[in-house]
Image (cartoon, rainbow, N blue to C red):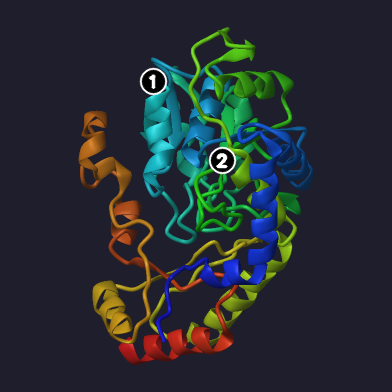
Amino acid sequence: MKINVWSYKNEYKSIREKILKEVDKVFSSGQLILGKNVKSLESNFSKQLKIKYGIGVNSGTDAIQIALMSAKIGKGDEVITAPNTAVPTVSAIVSCGAKPIFVDISKEDYLIDVSKIEEAISKKTKAIIPVNLYGQCVDYDKLLPIAKKNKLVVIEDCAQSTGSFYNGRPSGSFGHLSAFSFYPSKNLGAYGDGGFIGTSIKIYATRAAQLRKYGMKRYYYSEEHGINSRLDEVQAAIINLKLRKLKAWINQRRKIAKIYTKFLRDTSLILPKENKKNFHSYYVYVVQHPNRKYIMNKLKKNNIFCNISYPFPVHLMKGYSFLKYKKGDFPVTEKLSKRIFSLPMYPQLKNSEVLKVVKSLKEAI
């Protein structure tokens, strides 16, 4: 029995007929791009996030880039974020012409260390992109006052936190803008690429809607330079369908996490911590151990496959060497990148599979 770190196949089996029905409706409608399914998703997801506006785009990366462009952040500007993140967070900043400025993370929860943000702010700083990583939110009670004091735009990177809450409010409802990914492995994943921008500020919503379509306000006339980033109808229809199941699937993720925590708390693994004020959606269940490679290899021999999020800090990647960061600049991120790994986590995992992972881990440690 092979246990993958993630798989959509059992999910697909359970809703296959409904998905195929929705896809057939799209193909029969005569409209494949930016039609009624996209509008419906934009409305439905915005309501769930308790924000006013939603804009469907081609990917989570584009969602961040367009959010930045909507706030007129570009060449010469600096944007603060964490080095323990997926490349797209940084790629989007660079693609809009701005410069990423990194702040190290906390060793307790792997999220940006809010206490270190102010020392990274300069006259060029225009925005902060807090990454709500692994399924849990940054400490917004502390971050938002810093942003307000320094007149900075806050753009939440919610690629991994769909379905999470902080102080009872949904992830994606704290920043001036928020960016979501519908990549297949996400809590709310499409069967292809997709992204979403959320905001309650009308001017940002209006600009984002134009920027996703070459900066066009009216038919084939560009008001400003934009990009091609339109969410297609097929993916919107699928996400709309899955949105109805999101709450139940998040609850199942939390049940799986509870089993892991119960049976692994007395081992030498360091387990994830659910911060106070947070409702963790467990996009991934991240543990850490100094013997990561040995443990992962032992699990692999038992047909259990884990993942590392992330093995290479962005600031040390060749593609971002022009930023002039060096080894040792962010010691917490660098240390944890050699220790953390993710256990299998998705709603369709059976209890027997979860317990097999637990048993194999205990034998490997």
Which residue is more in the foreground, 143 or 357? 357
Q: Which residue sits at x=50%, y=39%? A: 59
Percent position (x, y) of residue 301? 28, 85
- Please state which of the two labelled residues, at mark 1 or mark 2, is closer to the viewer: 2
Which residue is more in the foreground, 33 or 326? 33
Q: Do residues under tags 1 and 2 come within 8 Å of each other at their CB atoms?
A: no
Circle 1 is placed at which residue position?
97
Question: Three-letter amino acid code at disc 1?
Answer: Gly
In the rendered image, the quadrant that contains the C terminus is bottom left
Vertical placement of 219 versus 268: above or below? above
Few, some or many residues within 10 Å of mark 2 (<14, 14–19, 20+): many
Vertical placement of 161 versus 96: above or below? below
Percent position (x, y) of residue 93? 42, 29
Question: Three-letter amino acid code at disc 2?
Answer: Gly
Circle 2 is placed at which residue position?
195
Alpha-carbon span between mark 1 and mark 2: 21 Å
Q: Secondary structure at mark 2?
A: strand
Q: Which residue sits at x=39%, y=26%? A: 95
Q: Which residue sits at x=65%, y=22%? A: 204
**Left or right of residue 306, residue 324 in this image:** left
Whether residue 27 appears in this view of the structure is yes
Percent position (x, y) of residue 226? 50, 17
The disc label shown at residue 354, or none: none
